[in-house]
Amino acid sequence: MIGSAIIRRLEAAGCCNILTPARKELDLMDSIAVSDYFEKTKPEYVFLAAAKVGGIMANSRFPADFIYQNICIQNNVIHTSYRTNVKKMLFLGSSCIYPRDCPQPIKEEYLMTGPLEQTNSAYGVAKISGVQMCWAYNKQYQTKFLPVMPTNLYGMNDNFDLETSHVLPALIRKFHEAKVSGADSVTVWGTGSPMREFLFADDLADACVFVMDMDMTDDEYVNNPLINIGTGKDISIKELALLIKEVVGYSGNIVFDASKPDGTARKLLDVSKLEKSGWTPLKSLQDGLTETYNWYLENTGE
Ligand code: GDP
């Protein structure tokens, strides 16, 4: 989802020589393959968006996969970017690297000031180690590696699998299927009270290109840089469900299943640093949801 959005954004800006190896062509978990690929193609700018990602259930059930695969991918790409003299590298983290109970909205400096949310701590620790790795290489080797922390993302090419996806695509699918089958109700996990912030993947791509282009001094790279990317606004899962119900055009009821986990109560990013640099998102949640639902209808054969 993120990779294809970044490619669209780079193409729109007229960039050429965009390298987009598919998984079959380059397995990022294979250190020798990554090294050979970088030696051969000599990328100058790297967007590290590839990761093992998933929703609350996938993270709770497969923590070993999340920590192992993410650390492998990061180790290979970050170390090889250093070895092959990549000019700049952007490492995409996640808002779940921040402590579970930190003040809201979450400022970049709250990183590693408290315990993580249990449902995704393995993933969070993997991403924190990626941030630390960028900082360590900048200090020791004067690289220009910049970690950015996007909030919850959604958009075209999202994962709509009900077991492993995040809430937004899951609810699009659930409401759509209920509408088609004429079901009386749709079940939403948890209590509906957790608050989440959602950013359209194409807005994230725009922010990534903006940040990659930003002029930063050598000192700023050495001084543990970190930039949150989000909208600065959040809504409850209940409000999200009502919005998706409306976009899909479903007229039945919503039932909350409190036996499923809520996860973090709130994780709203403080995006003032990025805003001060001159970037703000374009897409409203309503428009982004409509576009994503249209993409779902056209591409999933439902
Ligand atoms: P999180 O942001 O890491 O907690 O990941 P999710 O996007 O998977 O879940 C966000 C919130 O939405 C949690 O409180 C979930 O319990 C809730 N939720 C409600 N219905 C669903 C659903 O059908 N799928 C998922 N993944 N989450 C849901």
Image (spheres, grey):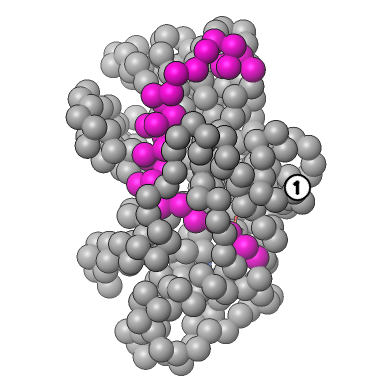
Q: Amino acid at mark 1?
A: Cys
Residue for point 57% across, 35% down: 273
Residue under pointer 1: 102
SS state under label 1: loop
Above or below, comparing residue 175 to residue 126 in the picture: below
Q: Position of residue 167 (x, y in %)?
A: 51, 64
Q: Is residue 100 above or below residue 3?
A: below
Left or right: where 165 falls relative to 18:
right
Residue 142 pos. (x, y %): 55, 8
Viewer-closest of 162 and 228: 228
Magenta region, main secondary structure: helix
x%, y% of residue 170?
Answer: 46, 67
Q: Nearer the viewer, residue 288 or 69?
A: 288
Q: Residues within 10 Å of mark 1 (few under 14, many from 20)?
A: some
Residue 209 within the magenta-colored segment of the rendering: yes
Q: Please give the range of residues in magenta.
A: 194-223
Quarter of the image where ligand 1 sits: bottom right
